[in-house]
Image: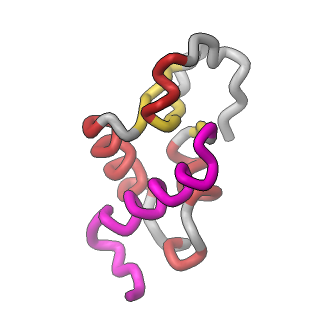
Amino acid sequence: MAWKGNNTTDVETAIRAYLAAHPTAADNAVGVQQWWLPRRLVDASLHDVETALAAMTEQGCLTEIRLPDGRVIFASGHAKGMDDWSGAAPR
């Protein structure tokens, strides 16, 4: 079924699939939108991606990591034990 752009369910499913294939992935919302979503979701808005990321963070599926410069990246919920993300280079 084609994505209609009116909810984040497909975006969440795509993020889960990406993390299953790339469990150590971490990126900001724009990077998730550009790199983690399949072609069929190319028209997903940044708002839909941010909504999905927020829901998944609240569910414990993702960890929100605030970098020293204030940028925020998202990683698998299993990344909670990782101490130093200061060297991460989100897109």
Q: In this view, does 88 lie above or below 7?
A: above
Residue 60 placement: quadrant: top left
Q: Is residue 37 left or right of residue 45?
A: right
| 61 sits to left or right of 38 | left
Residue drawn at x 42%, y 54% is 49
| Residue in the picture at 68% in, 41% down | 91
Residue 43, horizontal then vertical, whole percent: 49, 73
Segment colored magenta: 1-24
Name the residue: 38% across, 45% down.
53
| Residue 10 image point, x, y percent | 37, 68
Q: How is the image coloured?
A: secondary structure
Which quadrant of the structure image shows residue 37? bottom right
Q: Is residue 5 left or right of residue 86?
A: left
What's the residue at 38%, 58% (across, down)? 12
Viewer-side residue, 3 vs 78: 78
**Relative height, residue 86 to residue 59 (above, below):** above
